[in-house]
Image (cartoon, helix red, strand yellow):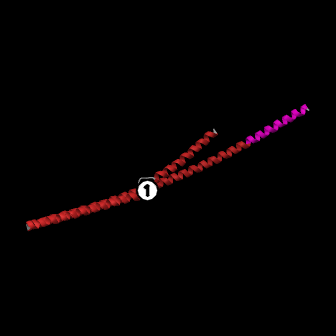
Amino acid sequence: MADNQINTKDFIIGTLVGSFVGAATALLLAPKSGKELRGDLNDGAVQVKNRATELAGAAQEKGEELTSKAYSATSDFTKKAVDATSDFTKTVADKSQEVTENVKQKTAELKDTVDDKISDVQDKAEDVKDDVSDKIEDVKKDAADKKAEAEETATKKAAEVKKETKKAASEVKKEANKKS
């Protein structure tokens, strides 16, 4: 029975230590940190903004090309082309601004979500740490109790053996005295 209890305790200790090491390893080996993820999102936002700027530049170039053609055709047609180009450029700029604001908003929301998840993981890690500490203390207490119990049992057995030895020695003396 004592061997079974020792094996059970060893198993519990091993399980707890293994769980703690596994949790720590999972945290350390996560694919990307929140900082890296935010960096990637910011890079994406910059790329979207640059692309929108390129589109606005391309639209403006196209508008200038149309304007030069319109000047050669008629002045009335030129005015319409300039108006259309201006409207198109304004629309592209407005859409570009909308996209940029939308990306900024989504980035902020994602950052908040990531920060919340990091906080949750830290809280859970702290809880696991506290649980492991409590379990270790329980195991230490149980080990101390079992040690004290074993010492007490050994002391009782030693006293019994001593008593039986004295009794046997006394009987041997009596037998020796009867023979002499």
Q: Is residue 159 magenta?
A: yes
| Total tally of numbered discs in the picture | 1
Q: Is residue 100 left or right of residue 76?
A: right
Relative to 27, 40 lies left or right: left
Asked if residue 110 lies in the magenta stretch, the reply is: no
Taking the image as shown, residue 141 lies to the left or right of residue 28, namely: right
Q: Position of residue 179 (x, y in %)?
A: 90, 31
Q: Residues within 10 Å of mark 1 (few under 14, many from 20)?
A: some
> What residue is pinned by disc 1?
118
Q: Does the magenta stretch mainly form a helix, a strand or a loop?
A: helix
The image quadrant that residue 61 belongs to is bottom left
- Picture coordinates of residue 123 (x, y %)? 47, 55
Q: Quadrant of the C terminus?
A: top right
User: In terms of secondary structure, where does tag 1 sit?
Assistant: helix
- Residue at 36%, 58% (x, y): give it: 40
Who's the residue at 62% across and 49% down the image?
141
Q: Quadrant of the N terminus?
A: top right
User: Residue 156 appears at what percent x and percent y?
Assistant: 73, 42
Q: Residue furthest right?
A: 180
Measuring from the top left, give residue 85's x and y in whole percent.
16, 64
Residue at 63 percent of width and 40 percent of height? 3
Q: Nearer the viewer, residue 112 or 18?
A: 18
Q: Which image quadrant for residue 162?
A: top right
As shown in the figure, which amino acid type bears the numbered disc 1? Ile
Per the rendered image, the range of residues in magenta is: 156-179
Residue in front for this viewpoint, 45 or 5: 45
